[in-house]
Amino acid sequence: MSDLVVPHGVVIALAGVFGLLIGSFLNVVVHRVPAGLSVVRPPSACPGCQHEIRGRDNIPVISWLLLRGKCRDCKMPIPARYPVVEAATGVAFALTAWRFTDPVLLLASLVVVGAGIGLALIDIEHQRLPFAITRVTTILVVLVVVAGAATGSEIDWRAVAVSVASWGGLYALLHYGSGGRAMGLGDVALAPVLGLVLGLVGWPAALIGLFAGFVLGAVILMPLRVTGRIGRRVAVPHGPFMLAGAALGLFVGLPLSDMYARVVGLA
Ligand SMILES: [Zn+2]
C-alpha cells in the first residue's frame, strides 16, 4: 500500500464530489443506453417541455432541491430518483476512497462501483446488462491495472488470475451449462472485470464476493417465491445480486477472510 501525498480526508471529499457528478452522468446513462441513444448528444432536456436543462439547474442534488423537484419552465415533477442516484453515487465514491488508499485499487474500485450502480439500475428496469457499459468498464479497469503495474505498483498476479478465472469460469459454466436459462450472457460478460478488481484485494475476498452474490439472491428471493409474491416462472435479473456480492467482497472480503482464518486457526 503506497500512501497518497494528499491527506486522506481530502481524497475522500474529492471522491464524494466526483461521485455526485458521476451519479448525474449515470442518470443519463441509465436512461439512454438501453434505448440505444448517445450519452453525449443531445444535451439533457425536460421531457415535458423539451427545454434544454440549464447548467445551473444541472448541479447534482442541489438543483433538484432548489427547484423543489420541478422543471423551471413547465413545473413538471422531476422524479426523486435522480437526486437519490446522485447522492448514493457520491456516498459510494467517498466510502471507496475511505476504504482504499492504494491508487490502483482505489481507481479500479471507483470504476466498477460507478458502472455497477448504473448496471444494477438498468438490469432491474430492463433485465439486461448492456455490453457497451461492460466493455468500457473492462477497458478502464485493465488500463488502470496495466498503468499501475508499469509505474511500479505491486500486483499479486496469481490472485488476479485465480479470481478472474473463478468469476469468468463459474458464470460461463452456469450460462452455457444451462443453455442460457440460469444466467444471461450479460452476466457472463461482466464477471471477468469484477473478478479482476476483487483479485486486486486478494483471492479470498474474490471468492467471498463471488459466492455472496448467489447467497444474497437465494436469501432475498426464496421468501418472495415461497409466499408467491414473485411467481415461480418469473425471471428475476441476477445482475444486481452479482454486483451486491462483488461490493461485499470488495469492502468486507478482507476482514471476513481474516476473521475466518483466525477462527479456524490458520493465522
Ligand atoms: Zn419542463
Image: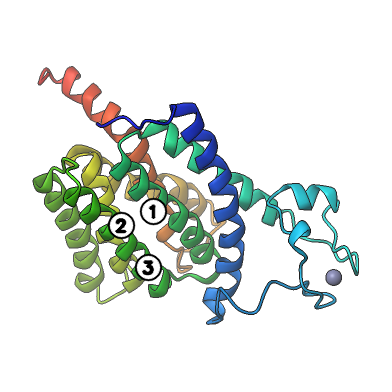
Amino acid marked by disc 1: Val
* Quarter of the image where one finds residue 247: top left
Label 1 environment density (alpha carbons within 10 Å; few <14, some 14–19, many ≥20):
many
Q: Residue 204 location, x and y as percent? A: 19, 38
Please state the quadrant of the image where ligand 1 appears.
bottom right
- Mark 3: which secondary structure? helix
Q: Is residue 170 visible?
A: yes
Quadrant where the image shows the N terminus: top left
Q: Residue 14 location, x and y as percent? A: 53, 39
Q: Residue 62 location, x and y as percent? A: 75, 47
> Which residue in the structure is indicated by mark 2?
141
Residue pictured at 36% horizontal, 35% vertical = 100
Residue 112, numbered label: 1
Q: CA distance from mark 3 to mark 2?
A: 9 Å
Left or right of 19 on screen, residue 110 = left
Q: CA distance from mark 3 to mark 1?
A: 10 Å
Amino acid marked by disc 3: Val
Q: Nearer the viewer, residue 76 or 58?
A: 58
Tag 1 or tag 3, which sits nearer the N-term? 1
Residue pictured at 55% horizontal, 68% vertical = 29
Tag 2 or tag 3, which sits nearer the N-term? 3
Residue 136, numbered label: 3
- Mark 1: which secondary structure? helix
Q: Nearer the viewer, residue 14 or 220?
A: 14
